[in-house]
Image (cartoon, rainbow, N blue to C red):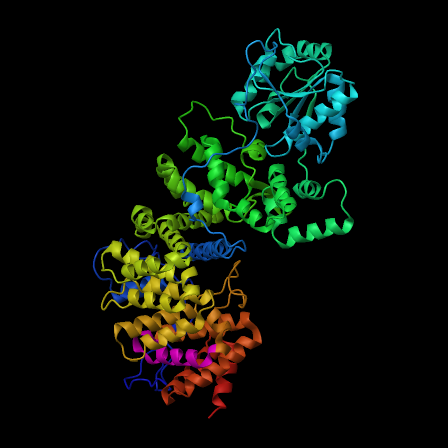
């Protein structure tokens, strides 16, 4: 245990009982500073930064003379760190076990086989007027009709088609538009008593229908016309209202029916002025589980068989796959596996692989509007729609050619077509939240765009950097997490391209973002070692302004997510940053790093480190720095944040709340702090803060813990006991601010031997 060095009495605790209490008996300054990485670098207190060692006095001033704005910055940092922790844990602990960076993400390009095949066989010359047509084969017709599950409103759609001969059927891709259209045509032809065979045909030339002399090529037939998703395809049908009477007359004259299918752009086109006469039906997607069940068991199937199938789908993750990927084609594909006796769980896992999903999506969508929203959703997932949309508009502007006026962009309208992997979830307490259907899709989207869209990498990074200055704390936190995800793809490139520049920036907020990004980057086993090596290198740097900032960022990072998972590595980084002989410039950053470790539940490891570093119990720089960091941590109140430690009383330092579990360590550190002459006044001020302010907030348990602490400290040396009794009495009898708690503790300590 510590023993006070024999020396003349100091203002902190005289052995002469007649010595009056100095001015420090008044309320200590509790506006503890929030340094910005170096005591003279970025904090609001001291002057401009300079290269070279920082003095002890300057470091102590920076540590103690913060402002309310500094405290607000640190509070923001703690909340941002908690948000980042939660996101990183979700990314790393997802139950699917799939990870980004798999070979599937970087394989050769794959093509997408969705929608209609517009390049099918064409009729030879001499085919009937009306455009090229292709009859549906018997197998294809049977596949669409035999096990068809009717969507909601199917009956009204059939009535409209039978009556008006032409129906516009809109819905998102994968909603079963084609199957519904084929069934509607088949039933409408049957109801009309077609005597020409009732064959269904595809019209392969959409523009032909709008020609002035168009007629159905084959009598008594049904026609399916798929309008290409996208504005270009739908724009051709702006003329449909004008041509509608002639088209309907031709259909009726030849006993035919026509269904146009398309997505959001076709829906917008047929809602324009003058289109009131067009029969439009908006398709409600069918439950994909119902499609799978029908295709696997048919129209029959005992209730027990259906229940068993549902249970198997739920337990094997197949149901989750279809909730994330609700397109009817996926349900049909998995149903085929069930019927064939193949491993449907493995098939669902393959289908769910986010790498394949993302590659397929980027193969289909190359326009800046769609890509911008996907990336904004990936960075800001779980944010409100307007927050994501605003960020997407800004990114789109960076990716697209300059426009003379604000663009007419409506992301929400296109979610069902272009962004089926994204959903808007209602939130009872606020606006709808933007979320990917699969928890890993967002990170894969980021990685793919970062590694695959070479021409857009620079604007993407610039946009991400601007998000770090956003007024919304959550936006800043999520942007920093996204930067860490980008580092997963290529750690070396990320460090030299942006992380080091951010970590050495003059903006404390940007340095905090670098620390958060590094914490996320190092949260995976395959990148953790590289991040720790980087932090050690920064921590051992020199005394220039830039090197001090890098060391401060290293300490900040060590106190975050990485430190919680590897506390021994974290305190090693803090030691490297602190052990700089006569340069005290990193003390504030290390002190804050220690506070963050405490707030992440690593009290034991930090206290053990402070005990080890101060073991010489002299007045050497490392001892004074270590005990200064300890005293600083004793004064930082606990702020409940999502993802923070469960224990703790709001406004009370966690070291006081954790005192019963760490009595021996705390008593020794308090004793060493009181025995260290350069720190004695600070230690006494911190102790009074515990007694007068925090013990009141902590209630009786805190006061009882303080009583035991003082007893333990008093047993380390006679001088400590005398000093404590003297100061407790002085605080109890302070004319300006008498302390009731100090009087109780003095009386209790006086009764001990």
Is 95 drawn above or below residue 409 in the view shown?
A: below
| Residue at (45% x, 58% y) in the render | 78
471 drawn magenta:
no
Q: Which residue lies furthest to the bottom in this view?
A: 753
Tell me which segment is drawn in magenta: 662-680
Say whether residue 458 is left or right of residue 728.
left
Is 384 drawn above or below residue 21 in the view shown?
A: above
Give the main secondary structure, helix, strand or loop, of the magenta stretch.
helix
Q: Which residue lies furthest to the left in this view?
A: 52
Estimate the x, y position of residue 692 in percent, counting from the top left.
Answer: 49, 73
The mark tally for this picture is: 0
| Residue at (38% x, 35% y) in the render | 456
Q: Can residue 380 be seen in this view?
A: no
Estimate the x, y position of residue 331 in percent, counting from the top left.
Answer: 63, 41
Locate the N terminus by quadrant: bottom left
Nearest the viewer among 40 and 135 is: 135
Estimate the x, y position of residue 306 in percent, counting from the top left.
Answer: 73, 48
Is 297 drawn above or below residue 81 in the view shown?
A: above
Say whether residue 104 is left or right of residue 529.
right
Nearest the viewer among 388 and 163 is: 163
Say whether residue 149 is left or right of residue 413.
right
Estimate the x, y position of residue 612 in percent, counting from the top left.
Answer: 34, 77
Q: Can residue 665 be seen in this view?
A: yes
Nearest the viewer among 594 and 8 is: 594
Is 91 drawn above or below residue 609 in the view shown?
A: above
671 drawn magenta:
yes
Q: In which quarter of the image is residue 715?
A: bottom left
């Amino acid at each position: 245990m510590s023993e006070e060095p024999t020396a003349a009495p100091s203002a902190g605790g005289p052995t002469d009982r007649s010595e009056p209490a100095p001015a420090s008996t008044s309320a200590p300054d509790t506006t503890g500073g929030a340094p910005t990485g170096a005591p003279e670098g970025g904090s609001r207190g001291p002057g401009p930064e300079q290269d070279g060692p920082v003095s002890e006095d300057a470091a102590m001033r920076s540590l103690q003379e913060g402002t309310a704005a500094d405290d607000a910055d640190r509070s923001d940092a703690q909340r941002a760190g908690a948000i980042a922790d939660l996101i990183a844990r979700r990314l790393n602990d997802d139950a699917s076990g799939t990870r980004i960076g798999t070979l599937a993400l970087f394989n050769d390009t794959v093509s997408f086989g969705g929608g209609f095949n517009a390049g099918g066989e064409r009729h030879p010359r001499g085919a009937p007027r009306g455009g090229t047509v292709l009859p549906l084969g018997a197998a294809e017709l049977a596949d669409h009709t035999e096990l068809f599950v009717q969507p909601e409103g199917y009956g009204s759609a059939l009535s409209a088609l039978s009556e008006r001969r032409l129906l516009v059927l809109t819905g998102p891709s994968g909603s079963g538009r084609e199957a519904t259209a084929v069934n509607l045509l088949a039933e409408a032809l049957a109801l009309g008593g077609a005597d020409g065979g009732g064959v269904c045909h595809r019209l392969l030339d959409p523009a032909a229908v709008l020609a002035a002399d168009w007629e159905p090529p084959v009598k008594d037939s049904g026609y399916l016309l798929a309008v290409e998703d996208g504005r270009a395809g739908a724009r051709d049908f702006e003329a449909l209202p004008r041509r509608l009477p002639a088209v309907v007359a031709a259909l009726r004259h030849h006993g035919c029916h026509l269904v146009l299918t398309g997505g959001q752009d076709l829906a917008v086109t047929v809602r324009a002025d003058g289109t009131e006469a067009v029969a439009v039906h908006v398709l409600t997607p069918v439950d994909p589980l119902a499609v799978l069940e029908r295709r696997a068991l048919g129209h029959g199937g005992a209730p027990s068989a259906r229940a068993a199938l549902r249970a198997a789908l739920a337990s094997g993750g197949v149901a989750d796959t279809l909730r994330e990927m609700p397109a009817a084609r996926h349900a049909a594909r998995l149903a085929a596996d069930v019927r064939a006796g193949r491993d449907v769980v493995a098939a669902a896992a393959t289908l769910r692989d986010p790498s394949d999903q993302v590659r397929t999506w980027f193969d289909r969508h190359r326009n800046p509007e769609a890509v911008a929203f996907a990336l904004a959703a990936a960075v800001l997932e779980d944010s409100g729609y307007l927050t994501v949309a605003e960020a997407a508009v800004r990114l789109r502007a960076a990716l697209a050619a300059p426009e003379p006026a604000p663009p007419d962009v409506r992301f929400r309208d296109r979610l069902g077509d272009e962004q089926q992997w994204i959903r808007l979830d209602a939130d009872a307490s606020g606006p709808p939240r933007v979320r990917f259907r699969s928890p890993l899709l967002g990170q894969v989207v980021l990685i793919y765009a970062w590694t695959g869209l070479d021409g857009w990498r620079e604007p993407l990074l610039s946009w991400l950097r601007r998000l770090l200055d956003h007024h919304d704390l959550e936006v800043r936190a999520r942007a920093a997490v996204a930067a860490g995800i980008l580092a997963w793809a290529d750690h070396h490139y990320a460090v030299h391209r942006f992380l080091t520049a951010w970590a050495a920036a003059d903006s404390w907020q940007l340095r905090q973002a670098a620390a958060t990004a590094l914490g996320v980057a190092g949260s995976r086993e395959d990148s953790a070692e590289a991040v720790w090596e980087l932090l050690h290198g920064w921590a051992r740097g020199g005394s220039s302004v830039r090197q001090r900032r890098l060391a401060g960022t290293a300490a900040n990072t060590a106190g975050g997510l990485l430190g919680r998972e590897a506390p021994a590595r974290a305190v090693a980084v803090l030691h490297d940053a602190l052990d700089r002989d006569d340069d005290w410039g990193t003390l504030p950053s290390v002190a804050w790093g220690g506070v963050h470790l405490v707030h992440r539940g690593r009290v034991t490891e930090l206290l053990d480190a402070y005990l080890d570093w101060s073991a010489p119990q002299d007045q050497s720089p490392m001892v004074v720095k270590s005990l200064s960091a300890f005293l600083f941590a004793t004064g930082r109140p606990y702020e409940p944040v999502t993802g923070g430690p469960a224990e703790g009383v709001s406004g009370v330092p966690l070291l006081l709340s954790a005192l019963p579990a760490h009595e021996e360590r705390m008593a020794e550190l308090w004793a060493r702090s009181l025995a260290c002459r350069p720190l004695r006044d600070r230690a006494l001020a911190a102790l009074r803060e515990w007694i007068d302010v925090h013990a009141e907030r902590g209630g009786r348990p805190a006061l009882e813990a303080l009583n035991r602490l003082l007893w333990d400290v008093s047993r380390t040396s006679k001088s400590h006991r005398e000093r404590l009794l003297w100061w407790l009495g002085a605080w109890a009898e302070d004319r300006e601010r008498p302390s009731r708690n100090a009087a109780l503790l003095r009386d209790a300590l006086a009764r001990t031997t």
